[in-house]
Image (spheres, rainbow, N blue to C red):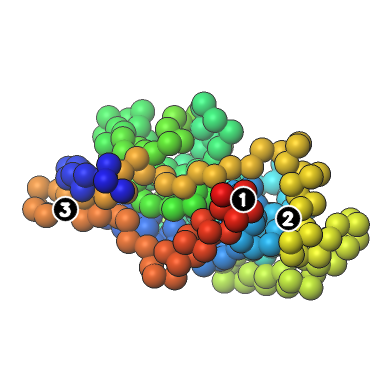
């Protein structure tokens, strides 16, 4: 933590508003996907494999031609997913709001990763300094500008979904988020049994280690921000405001996830 400086970064007033919106959406997605990503190792271990199992359920409900809202519904109902499902759910949540910037769900140019941005770094009206990244897939999701992005780098590649500046709320997104019927744990267990997999527990984690990890990459990507202690300010906000405002429950979750991962690795 000593490398975190608490330095101040000046952005436009509208960017401060968009950072606040991003923070709200990150909390909403975390609430809807409480078990964490299905390919973040710490979440898999702490949830005894449930995060991976629920991500698997989500993937059975979509295909390559599915829309962003279909991915969002699959994620919310399964209460799980990987980066694409997390990003789609964030995009759906943002689509229920009118925002004074374009909103895009994008695929990164350099790494296999999906996330959402508010703004457009290719347009000088926003640039990297005033484009906000919304990435709920990382373990420590924090609203951050593109210029302050963390270890993933956030180099925008193709964008498959776009909402224009000040687009009205999307009624389909609103209806989706108000009509979610989550998959029960019993249904997840049934899926595992039908595929001859162990029930949620240590045996499932061992199964994932032995049979899934050799074929699929798992991650331990923690912050979305290079320095979560950065304080954002406009010309009217002298002290600046940090976006790193995790609840005590979220902090406790991360502590438990770290301990579980260390034990699993034998550290």
Counting from the top left corner in percent of width and height, residue 116 is at 47, 44
**Quarter of the image where one finds residue 181:** bottom right
Precedes in sequence: disc 3 or disc 2: 2
Q: Identify the residue position indicated by label 2 in the image.
A: 205
Which residue reaches farthest front?
267
Horizontal and vertical percent for residue 218?
64, 42
Q: Nearer the viewer, mark 2 or mark 1?
A: 1
Q: Give me the disc on residue 68.
A: none
Q: Residues within 10 Å of mark 1 (few under 14, many from 20)?
A: few
Q: Are marks 2 and 1 in contact (CB under 8 Å)?
A: no
Report if the CB atoms under discs 3 and 1 are less than 8 Å apart.
no
Residue shown at 36% from the left, 51% from the top: 143
Can residue 131 be seen here?
A: no
Front residue (pair 11, 39):
39
Label 2 sits on a secondary structure element that is helix
Query: How many discs appear?
Result: 3
Mark nearer the viewer, 3 or 2:
2
Residue 92's spot in the image, x, y percent?
53, 56
Pair 3/1: label in front? 1
Q: How far, Cα to Cα, is label 2 from label 1?
A: 14 Å
**Where's residue 236, x and y in %?**
9, 53
Please give the label number shown on residue 240.
Answer: 3
Inspect this view and state whether residue 224 appears: yes
Say which residue appears at 81% left-offset and 44% top-offset. Answer: 211
- What residue does disc 1 label? 266
CB under 8 Å between callouts 3 and 2? no
Left or right: residue 219 versus residue 184 is left
Between the C-alphas of marks 3 and 2, the distance is: 43 Å
Q: CA distance from mark 3 to mark 1?
A: 41 Å
Who's the residue at 21% across and 44% down the image? 5
Q: Nearer the viewer, residue 223 or 79?
A: 223
């Amino acid at each position: 933590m000593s490398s975190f400086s608490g330095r101040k970064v000046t952005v436009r007033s509208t960017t401060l508003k968009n950072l606040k919106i991003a923070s709200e959406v990150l909390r909403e997605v975390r609430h809807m996907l409480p078990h964490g990503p299905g390919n973040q190792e710490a979440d898999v271990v702490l949830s005894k494999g449930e995060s991976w199992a629920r991500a698997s359920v989500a993937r059975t409900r979509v295909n390559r031609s599915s829309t962003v809202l279909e991915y969002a519904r699959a994620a919310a109902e399964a209460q799980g997913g990987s980066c694409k499902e997390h990003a789609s759910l964030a995009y759906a949540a943002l689509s229920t709001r009118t925002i004074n910037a374009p909103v895009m769900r994008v695929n990164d140019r350099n790494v296999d990763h999906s996330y959402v941005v508010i703004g457009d770094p290719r347009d000088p009206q926003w640039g990297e300094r005033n484009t906000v990244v919304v990435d709920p897939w990382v373990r420590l999701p924090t609203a951050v500008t593109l210029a302050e992005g963390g270890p993933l780098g956030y180099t925008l590649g193709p964008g498959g979904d776009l909402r224009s500046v000040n687009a009205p709320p999307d009624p389909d997104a609103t209806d989706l988020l108000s009509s979610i019927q989550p998959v029960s744990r019993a249904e997840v267990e049934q899926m595992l049994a039908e595929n001859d997999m162990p029930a949620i527990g240590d045996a499932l984690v061992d199964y994932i280690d032995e049979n899934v990890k050799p074929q699929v990459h798992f991650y331990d990507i923690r912050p979305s921000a290079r320095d979560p202690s950065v304080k954002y300010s406009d010309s009217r906000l002298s002290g600046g405001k940090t976006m790193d405002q995790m609840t005590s429950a979220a902090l406790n979750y991360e502590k438990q996830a770290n301990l579980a991962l260390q034990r699993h690795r034998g550290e």
